[in-house]
Amino acid sequence: MKIAEVESFAVSIPLKEPVAFATRVVEERDHAIVYVRTEDGTEGVGYSLGYGGADVIAKAVESVLAPMVEGEDPRDTSRLWREMFDATVQIGRKGVMVRAISCIDTALWDIKAKAAGMPLYKLLGGNADEVPAYASGGYYREGKGLEGLREEMETYVDRGHDVVKMKVGRKSLEEEVERVRVAREAIGPNRTLLMDANGKWKNKQEAVRACRAFEEYNPYFIEEPVMPDSLDLYREVNESLDYAVAGGELEFNRYGFADLLREDAVEIIQPDVTVVGGVTEWMRVADMAACHDIPVAPHYNWDLHIQLLAAIENGLWIEYFYRDSDVKAFDDVLTYPVEPEDGMIQLPQRPGHGVELERDALEEFRI
């Protein structure tokens, strides 16, 4: 089996109206899309959220990485990962290039599982046939207000979720405390409340003051209280709280996660397969976390992450966004979108990682 062709391009799917978190307003969701095809006609797909740079990621795949893998055996995932990473170390190591590697590596594993006639999670070890999902939301929108937040949280409970997540940090601390209070009231005292600040606070005083103000509402974790590269600050905040700090959605490769774990910066890691370096590197990170008894709660991309979480023993939850919340829009290009039932997602049994994209829809949104 040899790789015959690599195709890469970018799409951008508009949201119906702008949505915001602590540090950014979002009007559209752009993704780099990568297809890897073999001489026998097997096709694998990979992708990554672009945050405005999806076309740059797609070009990195086309101009830099594709020539390295064409003609190679797609099943040699470990070797090809190392060759792509080492060959781009001067211009990569993190950021765009590792996202590009993630796209190709994920597509290779899709091919590998299809060639084996197995769903990816079974090929990787098969620890469970269903995974728990939390409802992610609580974003900011013009005119939404406290009652809008309350209704949203109640909707997630009505849909069977015992774990929900909300955004914090965009408004004043007094307003944020009130938002957290409303969310806790909406879900009740016995369900799990998660919070995400997207790196909002700039120093220990700001971060600890805010996070301690939320303590009476019994949050399970605060995600990204500070910027991802502020490891000392991460550790100081983690040490100062009676509940967990989570992070890692913007961390790249095993070396970045080794730093997070070495510094005791987080108690829950959130690797994203489309960011960290693909399936190959995601599994290495998860296994490394298991050595530290650290649970894994991956960021976004539930269609891929269900396969990975179901393959490991230290998985915690899948992050899930309902399409009607109009925050994530990738379902619009999926052939088989998944949805939780009573807070659980059943693993698809199709060979490969299970994600198939609608080409007509991709063309509609193509950049």
Image (cartoon, rainbow, N blue to C red):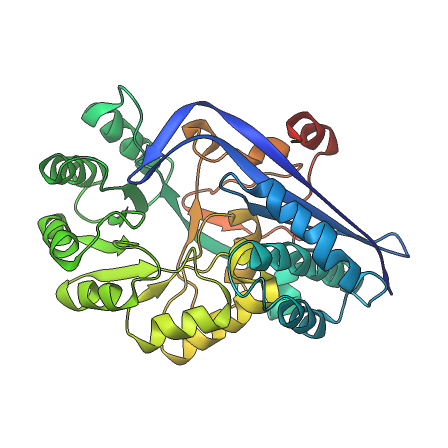
- Residue located 69% across and 61% down the image: 109
Quadrant in the rendering for residue 103:
bottom right
User: Which one is nearer the viewer's eye here, 11 or 299?
Assistant: 11
x, y (%) of residue 150? 23, 30
- Residue located 58% across and 42% down the image: 54
Q: Is residue 228 left or right of residue 328?
A: left
Quadrant containing the C terminus is: top right
User: Which one is nearer the viewer's eye here, 303 or 223?
Assistant: 223
Question: Going by the picture, which residue comes out furthest to the right?
Answer: 40
Visible residue check, residue 108? yes
x, y (%) of residue 190? 20, 49
Instruction: Look at the picture and state if 151 lies above or below 180.
Output: above
Q: Is residue 137 left or right of residue 235?
A: right
x, y (%) of residue 302? 51, 48
- Residue located 71% across and 75% down the image: 79
Quadrant containing the N terminus is: bottom right
Instruction: Look at the picture and state if 176 lies above or below 231.
Output: above
Question: Going by the picture, which residue comes out furthest to the front?
Answer: 90
- Residue located 46% across and 42% down the image: 341
x, y (%) of residue 275? 52, 56
Quadrant in the rendering for residue 205:
bottom left
